[in-house]
Amino acid sequence: MKSVKKSGPFLRALCVTAIVGVSSAWAGTATDNKELDSKALDNKNMAMATKSTSIWDQQELTGDWGGVRTELREKGVNITFNDIGDFLSDVSGSQTHHATYFGRVRGTVDIDFKKLADVDGRFFVTGMYQYGRNLSGQYLDIFGSTSSIAGEESLRLDEAWYDQGFIDSKVHLKFGQIAAVNDFGATNFDIFMSDETGYAANILFRGNQPFSPAGKPGAELTIDLSDITKGLYIKGGGFTAYNDAYHPDETGLNWNDDFNHGAVGAGEIGYVEQDTKYAGTYKIGFTLNDLAGGLYGDYSTGESVKGNYVMYYSMQKSVYHPTENGKLNTDKGLDILFQALSAPGDRNPVDFESLMGFRYTGLFEGRDKDELALGIIYANASSAYSRANQNAGGNSLDGETDVELAYKFHVTPWFAIQPDLQVIFDPRGDSARSDILVLGLRTVVNF
């Protein structure tokens, strides 16, 4: 890996150059890409949920259930099941090498009461079974995470909430058990296997905001500000925090304990581009908590400190669509992701994290749904954390750079397979450690 090691500074320079270029070209993010295993099918796919008798053409492996599935969706009831499995192996680096498999089976019921009963409301409930071992979580000792299947092996309820609209749907109140990261800070650029670009930057989790699959009780209020500027919105939320997201709440049903660990607040203002074929969403937001129990330690003094916060800026943007038969094909083309996040360095190992993602859909002729993606993640070790590491006999720490290359091959509408390559330069910001090459293969099955 010596040749790979030498390229680390170049890739870091590339990351910074790309960030500056994109930031000056677009001031923000694109229409949110729904997380594959936590969101119901979008309206387009609902319309395509077909009565086809061919297993190769139907949208789900189990088909249309004799027409029942389509009938339910037309009435606003969408029931989905899927499985995502990540095979990952660290084939280089000084650490002991492992080959792991980490999977998630999720079931979701999503009810649109506008269709069902002409009421401006929505009910959403989802749970899952996670199985296997998390490679980076258990073995690699890095700032990042090689799988966007967050968390640990468990069988649990993730989310169960109701969303009620008011004033011609200009105001929405959402309450129940919520994975707040999904709504405040998540990228949902689901082509990537890594957690940061594929779901949410790891720096966000230091704020102890509930995340999928460990939703917690809370409420959100979203206000549509289109009367001021079309596409503008503001939202805020409050949620229960946690010391350990999974213990003692192993099933997602221990609500009594959920209220024993302080509170988390979150806020965001965003803009969704309107009336354009180049969709874009731009967001700036924060998450903060009180955590009076002193969960955090000050790396400079060693004393317990109260509370934490994370600030984020996010952009997702479609920047190119090919012209076919004289028309712009908006189902193909290039989308980009940029995100920058910061947190106080005295109580966080990482005080700054930046993400870049590039995804091209339909690059090759005859493979209109396939996706090719490149992701670059940079996580900077805080100076206080670096000094604490040196005081403990370790090395001075700088930044970790993760680079990912992925290709998602859509074999059928209900099955996709994704080869994946990740390289971790200077793991945990330690330039003395050897770089890590991780080879992966993800499978996605929609039942």
Image (cartoon, helix red, strand yellow):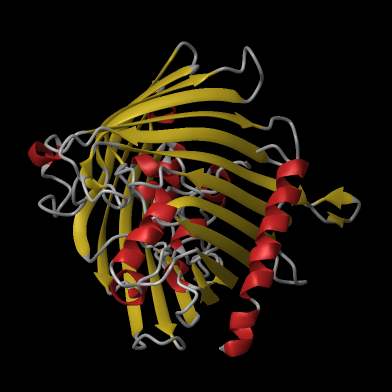
Residue 60 is drawn in which quadrant?
Answer: bottom left
Q: Is residue 51 visible?
A: no
Image x and y of residue 255, in percent: 12, 39
In the figure, residue 180 lies in which quadrant? top left
- Seen in the picture, residue 114 relative to 240 is either above or below; the reply is above
Dividing the picture into quarters, in which one does residue 262 lie?
top left
Residue sitting nearer the eye, 354 or 248: 354
Using residue 368 as the reference point, say whether residue 350 is left or right of it: left
- For the residue pair 235 and 141, the one nearer the viewer reads as 141
Q: Is residue 45 left or right of residue 243?
A: right
At horizontal 59% and vertical 88% (from top left) the residue drawn is 2
The picture places residue 171, in percent across and down from the top left corner, at 45, 17
Up the image or down, 102 lies above or below 13; here it is: below
- Find residue 268 and report its horizontal and vertical position in percent: 48, 30
Q: Which residue is at the far right?
A: 326
Question: Which percent across, then down, holds residue 198?
Answer: 49, 58
What count of labels does the image hold? 0
Q: Is residue 57 visible?
A: yes
Residue drawn at 65 percent across, 38 percent down: 28
Relative height, residue 382 to residue 274 (above, below): below
Quarter the C terminus occupies: bottom left
Q: Nearer the viewer, residue 131 or 424?
A: 424
Q: Quadrant of the N terminus?
A: bottom right
> Residue 194 vs residue 247: left or right?
right
Residue in the image at 45% along x and 88% along y: 91
Query: At 50% from the left edge and 40% from the top edge, which residue is drawn?
Result: 312
